[in-house]
Amino acid sequence: MIESERLFFIHNQKKVHRCESYENLRNQQALGSTDISNIGQHVILPSSFTGGARFMMQNYLDAMSLCKWRRNDGHFVGKSGVQLDNKNVAPYNKYLLKRYQAHINVQWCNQGSSIKYISACEESWWIFKYDVNYRHPVVIRLPFHLPDQQQVVYEADDDIKDVLDRPSISSSMFTSWMTCNKPRELGYAIGRIHSVSPKFGEAYFLRILLNKVKGPKSFEEIHTVNGELCSSFKDACYNLGLLDDNKEFIDAIKEANLPGSGLSLNEDQLKNLTLYEIEKILLGNNSSLKHYGRMPYPDVDSVSSSNNRLITVELDYDIPNLKNEFDQLFVALTNEQRDIFLDIMDAVKHNKGGVFFVYGYGGTCKTFLWKTISVAIRAQSQIVLNVASSGIASLLLTGGRTTHSRFIIPINLTEDSFCRINPKSDLASLERKTPLIIWDEAPMAHKHAFEALDRTLKDILKCVNPTNLIIPFGGKMIVFGGDFRQILHVVPGDSRQNIVNAYLSSSYLWQQCKVYILTKNMRLTVGSDPYAIEKIRDFSTWLLDIGEGNLGGPNDGEAIIDIPRDFLITNPHDPIISLISFVYPYILENFNIADYFQERAILAPKNEVVQEINDCLLSLFPGVQKEYLSSDSLCQSEFVHDEFDANLYSPDVLNGLKVLGLPNHMLILKVGVPVMLLRNIDQKNGLCNGTRLQVKSLGKCVIEAVILFGSNIRNQTFIPRMSLTPSEDKTLFKFQRRQFPLAVCFAMTINKSQ
């Protein structure tokens, strides 16, 4: 009855109560208007009305804030060897759980038949407006607004002067909150701000900034970036990197501009030279400006007249120098390496084809063997394609590329996949002209990748000889290399049996492989310190015994082993600091030395440990840190369905997502810090997924760095922000993140280091 009367009162008052912004009311007063009965809009049902649609939605969003608030307070329980903290706990009602010894869901009632009568006692409680529930911790909603845009509620027959003279009108909860921030008062509550659609313009950008600016004391402080007052909230978002804008690319080019050599070019010459350089980069990555319809093309005279630039690049070597280099490399081969080298070169010379696998653990110098074979073939003006399953391994190969880049292997592979190579393309012609392909770190790839290349080469080479359709890889000679005792291909969430079944050794191609084994550890022949050599030998033997399953007694792959005390961190109080001191001794004095970060890194099995080590070292590192914030947005492909509600995925929700392979929303860097590249940018110049670099300067739109590893070591480069999309399918929607494709790299995962 009381609720009915309340609704009846609101219904009768809806023609009386109106709502308008403070600024518009002041403008009306300045124009001399006193009648405000036709200004603003009717107030029909306030969001505070219990049971209303807006009331229910606001409480739902409060509950979601509580779920998001679950923090790691250091407490955890162990179950099956796994530590579980607050993030693993579903929201629950502790009283009901203890009372009924069961998890009880508190659900939103949306059916009239589910509503029950309440007792007289509860009715009295409601009538006297006593609290019928409580929430801990408290969720405080902050209704924000643009300057002077706070909403004012008044009656239609009120005088405008009386309305504006009210003491509480010129202030609001939002402005009072900013006032309280001046002497920062701490409380215990969860704050939440209302969502806003992008169509509201500046209010939308203000909401984004409120999630980034801590404790602002005024509107001006909210849109001040690096001490500069921006003209609008949108400009402030752009300067913080929170928005996508093509202007950013222009700013990045200007920022990365280096002083020239005095060469004078007119605008047309500069445009043509720029297009030519872009075309060279695209051609080196199996593409061309011709593939982009709206892009201009450089003058024909500027571009190589070769029919196939891919072949030209692979033949562009200094033959006399290669022959001299080969003489030096060949005499350094061990007997095992020499036998393998001679077999492979004989097969290449007589065009026998075949599939080979060189099996050797770390230290047997497989890379040295690949280099010797490559130099020998290129010295004869022939082509050898060096590829690797990982970007970090491809950097060690002369002219190396990742397999996915070189052969355009699909990211999401199936048992029927093909490489995206047209038989009439330049890349297909390169494959036909190539007598040998070397594929390093082969065990790290899924067997479907090898089978996709097998089907593709058969399709490309069948025109040369129809019998190539029944020969592995179409008769092309392939040499694989790797060690099955190292980290293998990762199959997320799959069983042990399926992971083993994904190996190359489980493919139908393995039966065609001729296996060679390298056993001599070349690291034991380097240096003259007998003690150091003995230590390396002991460590190498222990690792091999683990890989062969010789430790821990008879087992099926799971065993308890004893780790030598020399390999353990014995400090139980702060093991991370002990590890850092061992791997990075005197880091504050030595980080400017060129070779310091080239010789050391910390490897860990899990991303969580890597993140903890990197955060610790970054805090110890000298210098001023700089924060880079990403611009996150939903992909346009998500808007094809009418029922898709983009408002559920506001920028702060997307900002909070941490996805494997993507940089975090907030990237914190310092000058001198080692970083890892997370995307393939320019593999020919050593910029691929896994490349380690050292930061030299931190700009607004580009980051200057030098390469620490591989054949392009010490080369200077500029890294811009890029729009990145996660490749994994764990997210229920597709989104893109524009951020620098970098991650701090004092430590890295074992898988990433291979």
Image: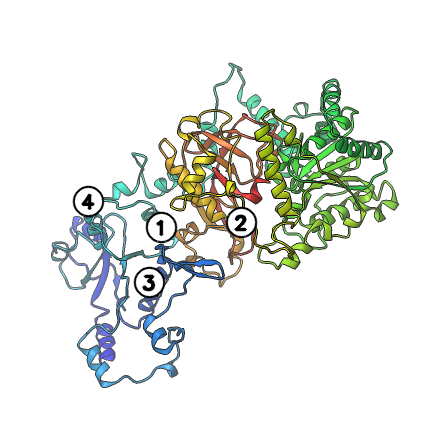
How far apart are the alpha carbons under marks 2 and 1?
A: 26 Å
- In the image, residue 531 sits, relative to residue 178, either above or below, namely above
The image's mark for residue 62 is 3
The image's mark for residue 397 is none
Who comes first in sequence, dot 2 or dot 4?
4
The residue under label 1 is 204
Who comes first in sequence, dot 3 or dot 1?
3
How far apart are the alpha carbons under marks 3 and 1?
A: 20 Å
Label 2 sits on what residue type?
Pro
In x, y percent, where is residue 680? 58, 38
In x, y percent, where is residue 629? 41, 42
Who comes first in sequence, dot 1 or dot 4?
4
Label 3 sits on what residue type?
Asp
In-front residue for pair 197/554: 554
In-front residue for pair 620/464: 620
Q: Residues within 10 Å of mark 2 (few under 14, many from 20)?
A: some
The residue under label 2 is 726
Quarter placement of the C terminus: top right
Label 1 sits on what residue type?
Tyr
Left/right of residue 476 with respect to residue 617 in the rendered view: right
In x, y percent, where is residue 541? 63, 40
**Residue 577 seen anywhere in this rendered image of the structure:** yes
How far apart are the alpha carbons under marks 1 and 4?
A: 25 Å
The residue under label 4 is 182
Who comes first in sequence, dot 3 or dot 4?
3
Residue plotted at (53% across, 58% down)? 640
How far apart are the alpha carbons under marks 3 and 2?
A: 29 Å
SS category of the residue bearing label 4: loop
- In the image, residue 486 sits, relative to residue 528, either above or below, namely below
